[in-house]
Amino acid sequence: MTAALDHGGGKPMRSRLSMAAPPPVRQVEDEIDLLAFLRLIRRQMVLITVVGGLLLAVQLPFIMMMERTYFAQLRLLIHRPPPATLAMQSATALDLAIEVERLVAQKNVAEVIAEFGLAESEEFNPPPRPPLLQRLGLVSPPPPPTEANPQDAVINNFYEALSVRRNGQTNVLEIGFRSLDPELAAQIPNALVRVYLAARGEQLRAQVDQADSWLARRIAEQADRVTEMEAANRSFRAENGPMSANFQLEAMYRISALGNREAELRRQQSDLRAMRAELEAGREVTIDSDPIGAGMSVGIRRDLQLQRRELARLLQIYGERHPDVVSARAAIEETQEAIRTENAGYIQALDARLAGLAEEEAVLYAELQTVRDRLSRMAAAETEYEVMTADLDRERAALVALEQQQRTIVTEGLLPLAEAEILSPASVPRAPDGRGRKFYLLAGALAALAAGVTVACIREMLDRSLRSQKQIAAIPQATAAGMIPILQRRGGMSRAERVRRRQDETFVDAVRWLILSAEQANGGKMPASMLVTSALPNEGKSLVALALATELVRQGHSVLLVDADTSCGSVHAHFGTEASPGYADYLANEAEFDDLIRHDPVTGIDYIPLGTAMPSSRTRLLGGLEVVQRARKHNQIVIFDAAPAVATTDTTSLAGITSQTVMVIEWGKTQRNLVELAAERLAEAGASQILLTMNQVNPRRLALYGFKDAGLFAPELRKYRTG
């Protein structure tokens, strides 16, 4: 908003007055309030008292039935004696946990119970007692249970009275027993240790006898097995004969010689095959390479060479057709034919030699295989014999170990595995153990009080209701507009009558603050139309609307109060008149507007009651506009008392046509999420301003929450207002 200010004839100076929405309230953490816990207790004193009293009442019968018992304790040291430790070199360490289980074994407990006749004692075998509800006759008795061993109940009670614990990391056991009889409390631990030691000795002897019998059978079986294996070794040795290292050396030497000879034969065969290939190819074979010694003569070779030289000379002199050349060629052909004939005979000799070498190689291979097979059989027999000998040695060692174990068991049977030393026997206690009934009663009361405080804290944590204007400031669509205290009925006068006659100055002052907030939110003047609604029913919106109208008339404004709550309108009841004709009748075109307006002489308020007709939604919206326009013509401030915002769309429709919306919420009851939902719906419908005021504030309860708003209702201020 911009306002122009003229200062004498110069250019107008403009002073900007910002009418924008104020910045959001910053949430500043309060300082730690050490009295907050005490205020919580004061707020929830009734709940704490009820919860604590109920819990204490539940505990009281059990506390009164408690009987003080006597407790006696025995200190027992369990260890392994030195002779037993030396005899059992490989034995594991003594397990104290196992010894404890043996000590409290059911067999030992049953023997102690029988010795002292605890089955006949009412302390350990009480008569069956029906439940409390059955004794009171509230429930019928259950069918008789199946037959059970009565000794089981005695044993269970015995275990509950018995306590066995280890003293630190030592082997010292503290065995205690609790009973109503001090002498019995001292006798039971001593008797239990005595029974345990006797049972431990019998158990050890039985274990030794059982182990000795088992080892004797094992030794006999092992001896038979060793005898059978020795006989098998002798039979195998006799079947395979003596096995010496010389035979293996001779066999290896023979295999080496045969291998060398085989290699030589293969080399000769290779040479002969190569020579035969050369002869077949027509190449000449030298005398040095002739392994047979019957090759071609040197003379034929020399003649062939001379003939070839002569042919070459004649060709140079006479040419190809000369008779001497022809005869020379014929001589050379004869010589070559003789060579071929001699080569054929030589090849046959080579084939015979190769066949002989092949036969010799076959004989050599057979002899080599025979030597190798015999050597392999002898090696396998030697290996098998060594395995049999090793198995025999192991079985003999096992037999020796069993015999040694038997001797050890017999020796250990003479020594105890564990030795128990009573450091301090259980003595008769002089005074009962534990706390008295007063202590448990006090502890129960403190526990009940703590439970009550816990329930109260949980209730406070789950409480999401609004109790301060600071909480309203966190809702973005709304603005806090004060807190209205609760208005009590006095002197047989209703609350509406007290509002009309302005008999509570604190209440009137809170309504004035609401009017001031409405003026500030509207630029310093009262809006022409206002909508008064709530988040939920029965939050006092109608009473606030009446108080708002009453105070506006008091300040000189002309006010028209319209009952627009078509479901539960009560404006006519506040003035003591009939509901019809009214606003709903006008909307349904069943009455004229001038016939609706009524005047209250006490407050000077013009008001329109609810009516009895059921108009349509469209006529409701149009009728609201007409009411606003008519009131504006008569310079009246129209106040609509509408239904809760989340209950019907009529309220949201009116929010869009009125200048300002006042939403009334009940202090300490309306949940924040419902208020936010109602504010969002009103804002979406076009409500320009939403003022949130808390109604029915209890000043005394508010003071217990530590909010700063409690100062608005301080006792000093109430005294000041009342004069």
Image: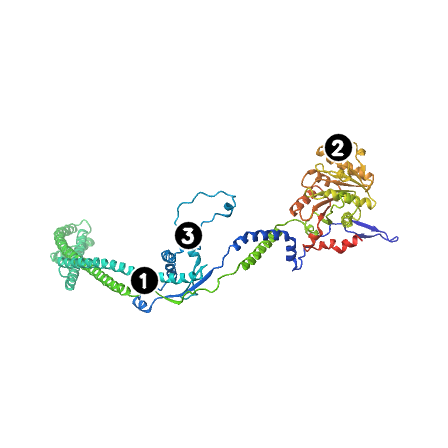
Could you tell me if residue 696 is visible in this image? Answer: yes
Q: Residues within 10 Å of mark 3 (few under 14, many from 20)?
A: some
Q: Residues within 10 Å of mark 2 (few under 14, many from 20)?
A: many
Q: Which residue is mark 3?
A: 153
Under mark 2, the amino acid is Asp
Left or right, 61 with respect to 515, comes to: left
Q: Residue 207 at what x, y percent from top left? A: 29, 59
Label 1 element class? helix
Label 3 element class? helix
Q: Which residue is mark 1?
A: 201
Quarter location, residue 577 = top right
Q: Which residue is mark 2?
A: 585
| 238 or 201, nearer to the observer | 201
Cα gap from disc 2 to disc 1, whole angstroms: 107 Å
Mark in the foreground, 2 or 1? 1
Q: Residue 241 at what x, y percent from top left? A: 13, 59
